[in-house]
Amino acid sequence: MSKIEKQKIMKKMIMTKHFLKRYSERVLRSDDYEQSYLGTHVYSDMTTRISDREANFVQLFGSNKNVKLPFDKIYQIVISKNIFITIY
């Protein structure tokens, strides 16, 4: 799967403020989440970290009511109706 295909899949998803804060804390290891560019930074970081298989999972199961999907081999993302809820 190419980077462009991954970007198309990720653009369909919505990231909540809670998700952006948790992603910043847990994945990026940064507490500086008040910056205005955080959404763009998280989006680009997710696009590079997500594997082909994980991107397919997001595409297939992202529209479900509530689902936990693997991310970056050690995290889990909670998705509900194409909205990223949290990551742990």
Image (cartoon, rainbow, N blue to C red):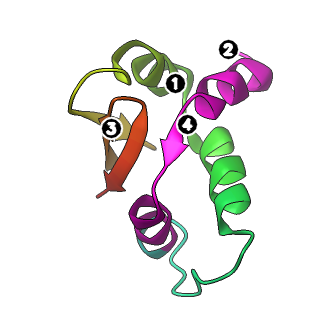
Check disc 2 and report the residue beneath it.
1
Mark with earlier residue (3, 2) = 2
Q: Position of residue 83 (x, y in %)?
A: 41, 39
Q: Are marks 2 and 1 in contact (CB under 8 Å)?
A: yes
In the rendered structure, which segment of residues is drawn in magenta?
1-24
Label 1 amino acid? Ala
Verify whether residue 10 appears in magenta: yes
User: What is the CA distance from the residue labelled 1 to the residue labelled 4?
Assistant: 6 Å
CA–CA distance in space, label 3 to label 1:
13 Å
**Residue at which label 1 appears:** 55
Real-space CA distance between mark 2 and mark 4, rounded to the nearest whole angstrom = 11 Å
User: Is residue 17 visible from the viewing direction of this image?
Assistant: yes
Q: Quadrant of the N terminus?
A: top right
Kindly identify the amino acid type of the residue bearing the numbered disc 2. Met
Q: Indicate the amino acid at tag 3.
A: Ile
Q: Residue at x 79, y 23 (%)?
A: 4
Q: Which mark is residue 19?
A: none
Q: Which residue is mark 4?
A: 50
Q: Is the residue marked by circle 3 packed among few (<14), some (14-19), or many (20+) residues within 10 Å? A: many
What is the x, y in percent for residue 3?
Answer: 76, 26
Image quadrant assignment for residue 9? top right
Work out whether mark 4 precedes mark 3 in sequence or the reverse, and give the earlier one: 4
Say what secondary structure mark 3 lies in: strand
Depth order, front residue of 61/71: 61
Decide if residue 22 is on the left or right side of residue 4: left
User: Can you identify the residue that label 3 sits on?
Assistant: 79
